[in-house]
Amino acid sequence: MTISVAIIGSGPAGFYTADALVNGGCDVQVDIIERLPTPYGLIRGGVAPDHQTTKKVARKYERTALFDQVRYFGNVEVNKDVSLAELREMYDAVVLAVGAPSDRKLTIPGADKKGVHGSAAFVGWYNGHPDFRDLEPDLNTRAAVVIGNGNVALDCARVLVRSREGMAGADIAAHAMEMIETAPLTDVYLTGRRGPLDAKFTNVELRELGALERAVPLARAAQLPDAVPDDMDPRDKRLAERNLANLRDYATNDPDAKPKRIHFEFFAQPVAILGDARVEAVSFERTRVVDGRAEGTGELFEIPCGLVIAAIGYRSDPIEGAPFDDKAGIIPNADGRVDDGLYAVGWIKRGPSGVISSNRPDGVTVAEYICEDFQNAAGKPGRAALAPVLEERGVRVVTFDDWKKIEAAEIARAKGSGNPREKFVTVPEMLKVLDA
Ligand code: NAP
């Protein structure tokens, strides 16, 4: 008996699940349903455009999409074109792999002023995600503040200071490159509410800042500890030592060595965004770290700026027809099991943490559960039920072959530029390729 599975979301978690199902030894038919015409989720819309090595994993996902058992249904929005309840009727198993596409909200006074953006929106904008094409952040400022000490904060700070030459070989959206290239921005402040040992940067990403073509990273020696405490977990300790060594280097850099600067500002808790309609400065309270927590010292200081990126983490959105734990920002689940025939993988299952490959074990586990749970089931029709419903509703399904045509057009548009592709950044543009 063939087990029919619908996976909602075509990012890493969705593709790892599809791959594990096909290679898991049970008889499956897997449909990957994606809201956008384009697949790969965070690989296309989240991973920084100058991190092409990370994006190469999409080749593996492509091999998965081309298995006979797998079909891609792009441009199909769940709960608009077809409901989750309907999918659960049609398929034996439905796997939610929709990630964490929204920003964790910055809740300090003034956070709604013009010029303050969440990192999900800002990253989506420079990566050409159709949802954020029209964000148009105003980069006409000399200084920007990035709030957060994670890898997304590093990505945002780095992309803001890169040049067109430095971005050669990247697939940054053309509209973003144009704006970044010509912006008068000279100083980006990368601020963390705790200290250098608490930062969540991975070392390769922190080190990368030392080799930027037109920006120099600066840290302040007075904010760096003499040593890493011995009682740290050995893995965290190794990372902290490596990061500390880089920050010590950055503390000796000449601020005038390059035209732009990235300033590390630790022990800085944002307390208000200042300005009239637009941001003019961020007010911070100096902190000290006590038992791992940031504790305010009462000392306030301001960083004048015309742009703020809050890179303080992502959030999943509730899905109609599935339970949601609003506090944790995830779908409540037992190791990926949500309800009879309903599963969750990736960031909607466990929150927005880890690297791309951290999603693989989620997919493997859920694939095993699905094979186990449906080995003796009667079998629902799956694709045979979905395809006619979408047709009847006039939904323009983008197949994997269609996506390859869109991709070929993006590659052709980039010819001669040295970049791997020039992305289409709106859905109508993508669909127009298929009409040609
Ligand atoms: P993250 O690693 O969780 O970092 C979030 C940062 O925001 C932390 O420094 C956190 O500080 C701070 N923060 C949270 N709430 C705050 C508040 N109210 N005020 C001030 N600061 C606040 O999240 P992320 O950077 O969004 O990254 C998400 C995941 O993607 C991570 O696992 C990351 O490693 C991964 N990623 C990896 C790469 C890569 O490998 N190249 C690139 C991008 C993303 P506290 O620590 O004090 O809470």
Image: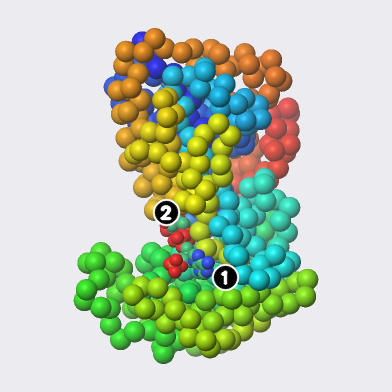
Task: In the rendered structure, find residue 164 and report the number of the disc placed on it.
Answer: none
Alpha-carbon span between mark 1 and mark 2: 19 Å
| Helix, strand or loop for disc 2 | loop
Q: Can residue 276 be spotted in the picture?
A: yes
User: Which residue type carries mark 2?
Assistant: Ser
Asked whether 58 or 76 is in front, the reply is 76
Q: Amino acid at mark 1?
A: Val
> Which mark sits nearer the N-terminus, 1 or 2?
1
> Could one spot residue 184 in this view of the protein?
no
Q: Position of residue 299 (x, y in %)?
A: 53, 88
Q: Which residue is mark 2?
A: 353
In this figure, which residue is indicated by the disc labeled 1?
146
Q: Residue at x 48, y 56 (%)?
A: 51
Horizontal arrangement in the rendering, residue 391 relative to residue 169 (left or right):
right
Question: Ligand 1: does it lie within 8 Å of the C-beta at label 2?
Answer: yes
Give the percent coordinates (x, y) of residue 111: 66, 67
Task: Name the quadrant containing residue 222.
Answer: bottom left
- Label 1's element? strand
Residue sitting at x 63%, y 47%: 129
Q: Are marks 1 and 2 in contact (CB under 8 Å)?
A: no
Quadrant of the rendered image containing residue 425: top right
Q: Residue at x 61, y 80 (%)?
A: 283
Q: Residues within 10 Å of mark 2 (few under 14, many from 20)?
A: few
Please name whichever residue, 307 or 114, is drawn nearer the observer in this view of the structure. 114
Pinpoint residue 46: horizontal percent, then vertical percent: 53, 51
**For the image shown, how many numbered marks are present on the structure?**
2
Q: Residues within 10 Å of mark 1 (few under 14, many from 20)?
A: many
Quarter the N terminus occupies: top left
In the image, residue 412 sits, relative to residue 174, either above or below, namely: above
